[in-house]
Image (tube, rainbow, N blue to C red):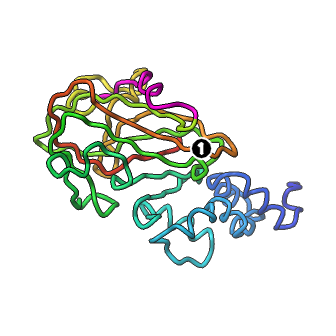
Amino acid sequence: MNHFLRLPEGCLSAILSLTTPADAARSSAVSKGFKSATESDVVWERFLHQDLVIPRSTSLPICATKKELFVTLLCHSHILLDGGKLSLLLDRWSGKKCFMVASRELSIAFVDNPRHWEWTTHPDSRFSEVAILKCTHWLDIRGKIETQMLSPGTNYAAYLVFKLLNDTYGIKTLNAMIRIVNHENENEAAKRATKVYMPSMSRFFIKNKTDPLYEKYAKKRGNGWMEVQLGEFYNKEGDDEEVEARCMEIERLHDKSGLIVEGIEFRPQ
């Protein structure tokens, strides 16, 4: 006899809320006794991180239950927050939070000079604007996020999300890094920057997952954009810090053009 099923439904819901969405779904599928408990708002509110999603969303759908809201979030490619400057999606299996900081919220060198950058719409972008590099010799892109917004006790990686124009030139490699802002200054972080390979360069390499440099190559995403990993970090429980992801090419001062920047994504691993 399964003694768990003798517990009050509220206790079962509390227990399930400490697992993951995948575990809750499996419990519902294998046992009728768990099915009612897995429908509880107690379970799905924890998975949703209500304190973050509801107040800051500009596009949150109206749903009858917290479970329906969670499933609806998963059916959408993203939910826009902070007036469309940030997007959120939840990992289907873990419920952990994934954010993308829009290009308008990034710090991009010379982005306000129309000789170097152009702001425009893009039909494939989740955001209202993207930044297009017209021509510059000094490429430096940074994005920040507060660790309290992220899922605690989780390994994260940051990615530059981009496209390239057909006439792109001068962008073969970038130096990339992650730093905790209050713990390391810019110069210290720049010294340990690692090289990542953009499509014009990475196509010449064998990109298989057993290659120790696999994560250093730009890759295609499922939505038509590309991404390149800028670094990884661990978000500890209770941390109240700011993380900065940065990529740059400020050593070889030749002209560069054709980069379309959608944003920087912070994604659980």
Q: Residue at x 21, y 32 (%)?
A: 171
Disc 1 designates what residue?
Answer: 241
From the viewer's side, name the closer residue of 133 and 42: 133
Question: What amino acid does circle 1 point to?
Answer: Glu
Camera-nearest residue between 162 and 112: 112
Residue 204 position, x and y percent, is 22, 24
Q: Left of 189 or right of it: where is 138?
A: left
Query: Residue at point 14% right, 48% down?
Result: 115
Compared across the picture, whether 21 is left or right of 191 comes to right
Asked if the magenta segment contains residue 192, the reply would be yes
Residue extending farthest left: 167
| Residue range highlighted in magenta | 183-197
> Percent x, y for residue 1?
88, 54
The percent position of residue 216, horizontal first and vertical second, equals 37, 28
Picture coordinates of residue 37, whole percent (x, y): 75, 66
The image quarter containing residue 218 is top left
SS for dot 1: loop
